[in-house]
Amino acid sequence: MRGKGVAAGAFGSLVAASAVLALVAGCVAASSSEDGAATPVATAPPTASVAPGAAPAAAAPPAAVPEVPRRSASLGENRAAPASAPVRIEVPDLGIDMSVEPVGLDAEGRMGLFDDPAVAAWYRWGPAPASETGSTVIAAHVDSLEYRVLPFARLKDATPGMRVVVTDAAGMRHTFAVESTAVTEKADVDWDAAFDRSGPPRLTLVTCGGEFDYEARRYLSNLVVTAVPT
């Protein structure tokens, strides 16, 4: 079973993250006709009148046309290839070995997650493991009524320096080292930092943590693990 969005137990406050909302917005610049700018219209130059019987003036020699260097307007040869998507994450010391699939936002504007305990979610609109800048976000549920405790539940035992390996679709293995772990109440999680596309490259792993509200049937906090390339 896959494809459910982040339930209240995982990313209740994610929809408030401006970083996520900015990434979802399309980056299509408005054309001149759409942004209100006037469109120049070519007009013919005025024609001088000639007196009857008078000889027409000699036409001026055509001006020399400068040689303008030409270059393809195509972005294909200049645009950097997008970084390969992650397809597997491993934390050997914790026995975590999961496949990873890309997700966007669900109908409620939250990052989608998978119920399947073998699948973690990568936020596809953000950086990838090979990106030169920004935070690569991979998240998964901590547990569920059907699957009980899931692999990411073991992240609570992550310690600084612990190795995390992410394999991308091109077969490249990217090794990270845990830098920090934090359990923070959902309302206080800095989602802008978690989903930041600027700054040094890093890996951000997210799941639920802290106390469980049995009445609301959700965790009150999130566990965020930050790792840096080695």
Image (cartoon, rainbow, N blue to C red):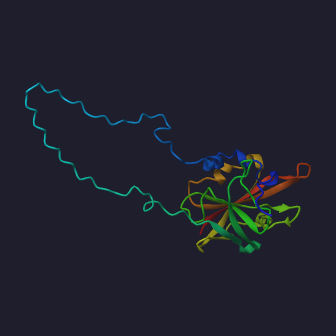
Residue nearest the viewer, comparing 174 with 157 = 174
The residue lying furthest to the top in this view is: 51
Total marks in image: 0
Instruction: Point out the residue furthest to the front here.
Output: 53
- Measured along the vertical axis of the image, is residue 13 above or below residue 183? above
Asked whether 15 or 74 is in front, the reply is 74
Side of 114 where 20 appears, left or right: left
In the rendered image, the quadrant that contains the C terminus is bottom right
Question: Most extreme residue toward the right, as rendered?
Answer: 215
* Quarter location, residue 206: bottom right
Residue 223's image quarter?
bottom right
Give 36 or 218, whichever is nearer the viewer: 36
Viewport quadrant of the N terminus = bottom right
* Image location of residue 199, percent across then percent down: 56, 55
- Residue 46 point in image, percent of width and height: 24, 30
Q: Which residue is drawn at 50% across and 42% down?
A: 30
Q: Which residue sits at x=65%, y=45%?
A: 18
The answer to whether residue 206 is left or right of residue 134 is right
Q: Nearer the viewer, residue 68 or 158?
A: 68
> Residue 158 vs residue 230: left or right?
right
Q: Where is residue 102 in the image (x, y as percent from the top left)?
A: 67, 62
Tell me the residue at 75%/61% (across/down).
Answer: 140
Q: How far across and how far down the image is residue 65, in percent?
A: 21, 48
- Seen in the picture, residue 129 relative to 54 is either above or below; the reply is below
